[in-house]
Image (tube, grey):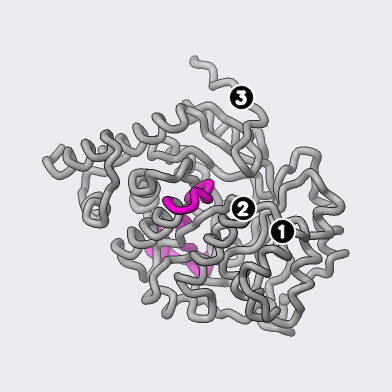
Amino acid sequence: MDTRFQEITEKVRHGERLTLQDGLYLYETPDLLSIAQLANEVNLSRNGKKVYFIQNMYINPTNVCEAKCSFCGFRRDPGEEGAYTMSPEELLEYVGHRMTDNIREFHIVGGHNHKVPFDYYLDTISILKKNYPNVTIKAYTGAEIQFFAKISGQSPEEVLRALINAGLDTMPGGGAEILTERYREKMSPDKASTDEWLEAHHIAHNLGLKTHATMLYGSIETKEERLIHMMRVRELQDETNGYLVFIPLAMQPRSINAGIRRRTSAMDDMRTLAISRLMLDNFPHVKAYWINIGTQLTQLSMHYGVSDIHGTLVEERISHAVGALTQSALTRDELVWLIQGADRIPVERDTFYNEIKVFEPAMKK
């Protein structure tokens, strides 16, 4: 362990915040295992050996979208082959065919469909809340909130208040991509700016919502931009304490047949998760998204600072519309097996990390 890493280790152990330069060093040093060990130490001090998951259902009511983000294979133009917009009744039918007694969360995101009014988005929430009152509604990203404000002529706060009245319980973390304007102007120029995305979450936190934060890495962003992204959500968390978890998302290539050089490496995935745990000292959890990095790396990530491995999903579409190679769903038993196989304690949770069931550790042979 070199002197620079020893200094970072001492800062972490004494509760001192890491800087941008500290983060850059962690991205540059070849000693990945020492980073993993330190991130694991931080996570164990926060969460013990517990690793969380949820039984949830992904729902994408529409794939029609006015934005043309360069990384997206899910969106469609109005009238394009494969374009769809579920009516509230069709949405209810879709959910009904996939619903089980154990699903605790609906995770709802979709296209920025400018061919339907804001009331459509309210109706998608209200019909689900009416029919499934005990299921948490996690719906609409910060970018979608700003889009709704544009099409409705309302402020983002008015939009969020209306969504809450319709049954919104929390917001997902999508739409963040990388929170720098250089990145957004190239990759997602039609969506919310850095400040607008942060504003949507700031308002949500002030209205009493707990939300999530993601980071889509592995394309044109620099390591410095990844760290700036982390520091921007860390700064908002200092102010509001409204984030539940940070979720680094590995960029998927546009085709399932893309070669390995078009995908993020295992080393980058593990390093980014571990650095996230070290940089985000005010986030309770860092999540590994098994859809994007696969089940084996997700299992390994539990020793790289990760305390959450997401959920069952039932039917994931957005990553699988591009190059994701994983299953579109996992069962509760499979998630428990993954966690136990990492010598961790599986904990089924609700959206807000209330514990539903704690499973026994795997038996030693």
Q: Quadrant of residue 318?
A: bottom right
Residue beneath the point at 47% across and 31% down: 47
- Which residues are drawn in magenta? 238-264
Tell me which amino acid carries mark 1: Ile
**Label 1: how many residues lie within 10 Å, few (<14), some (14-19) or many (20+)?**
some
Taking depth in this image into account, of 154 and 171 the one nearest to the observer is: 154
Residue beneath the point at 63% across and 35% down: 354
**Label 2: how many residues lie within 10 Å, few (<14), some (14-19) or many (20+)?**
some
SS under mark 3: loop
Q: Is residue 253 magenta?
A: yes
Tell me which amino acid carries mark 3: Phe
Residue beneath the point at 75% across and 68% down: 121
Q: Which residue is mark 2?
A: 209
Spatial separation of the CA atoms under disc 2 and disc 1: 9 Å
Q: Which residue is mark 3?
A: 359
Question: Quick check: can you spot residue 252?
Answer: yes
Check whether the beta carbons of the residues at disc 2 and disc 1 lie within 8 A of each other. Answer: yes
Residue 24 in percent (x, y) is at 24, 56
**Label 3: how many residues lie within 10 Å, few (<14), some (14-19) or many (20+)?**
some
Q: Which residue is mark 1?
A: 164
Taking depth in this image into account, of 270 and 203 the one nearest to the observer is: 203
Spatial separation of the CA atoms under disc 3 and disc 2: 29 Å
SS under mark 2: loop
Q: Earlier in the sequence, mark 3 or mark 2?
A: 2
Q: Nearer the viewer, mark 3 or mark 2?
A: 2
> Is the N terminus in the top left, top right, bottom left or bottom right quadrant?
top left
